Image: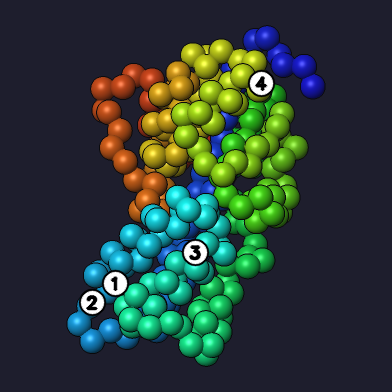
Amino acid sequence: MPQRRDATVLIFDADDTLWENNVLFERVIDDFLDWLEHPTLDRTEIRAVLDDIERANAVAHGYGSKVFLRSLAECLERLRARPATERERTELDELAAALVGHSVELMPGVAETLDDLATRHELLLLTKGEQEEQQRKLDASGLLRHFRAAHIVPEKDVDTYRWLTAEHGFDPAGAWMIGNSPRSDILPARAAGLNAVFIPNENTWVLEYDELDPTDNGVVRLAAFADLLRVF
């Protein structure tokens, strides 16, 4: 498919930008905190332990439901100072079962907005995570037809955006990364010379939080996905 010369390159994040994702993990964490009993730590303190474990496992093992389940088991073992029993591992599997094979719930206005944008611009998709798991969600979304290409990568850092720019041969100064994560979507894209659109999601994973420069004119902040039609 040749690139239209008059088109703007728009690159879309997937999880928590095109469809809900982290809210499913948050529900499992709530169930985990209900299930896990600790004699001295409250829910906030246990969640801090889990966040630290998830942060380390993201670096070592990547993202996705399998890594998440590993983090839950490690949290249990750290707090109880012993290996998890077979029964406990089974119960953890049951807690996390909702993450496997769940339906994809698009954000409001996503399908209609992409329908419109795809008539005027070149759309790319960039998502990080485990290949098979992310591909299943992409296939289930019904959105792939809108995108010139869809890339699943292990991490979204500055080098990833530089690679994407070279792979598709576009000028980063005229392209836009669109997503909900300051850490993965906005800051590394800006560092690679792209513009960015930040669409906050109240359910964004805590490890994706970061501070954005309010004076950065290369970042547009929108309240909802459909607002993209006012910009592009």
Query: Alpha-carbon distance for marks 1 and 3?
Result: 15 Å
Task: Residue lying at the far top in this picture: please name it.
Answer: 5
Quadrant where the C terminus is found in the figure: top right
According to the picture, the residue beneath numbered tag 2 turns out to be 42
Mark carried by residue 68: 3
Disc 3 marks a residue whose amino acid type is Phe
Query: Alpha-carbon distance for marks 4 and 3?
Result: 32 Å
Q: Label 4 neighbourhood size at 10 Å, few (<14), some (14-19), many (20+)?
A: few
Element at badge 1? helix
Q: Earlier along the polypeptide chain: callout 1 or callout 3?
A: 1
Q: Residue at x 28, y 37 (%)?
A: 211
Q: Residue at x 45, y 67 (%)?
A: 71
Q: Residue at x 24, y 70 (%)?
A: 45
- Horizontal and vertical percent position of residue 219: 38, 25
- Horizontal and vertical percent position of residue 105: 59, 56
Disc 1 marks a residue whose amino acid type is Ile
According to the picture, the residue beneath numbered tag 1 turns out to be 46
Element at badge 3? helix
Position of residue 2 in the picture relative to residue 85 (left or right) = right
Query: Alpha-carbon distance for marks 2 and 4?
Result: 49 Å
Q: Earlier along the polypeptide chain: callout 1 or callout 4?
A: 1
Q: Label 1 neighbourhood size at 10 Å, few (<14), some (14-19), many (20+)?
A: some
Query: Alpha-carbon distance for marks 3 and 2?
Result: 21 Å
Q: Earlier along the polypeptide chain: callout 4 or callout 3?
A: 3
Q: Earlier along the polypeptide chain: callout 3 or callout 2?
A: 2
According to the picture, the residue beneath numbered tag 4 turns out to be 168
- Horizontal and vertical percent position of residue 107: 54, 49
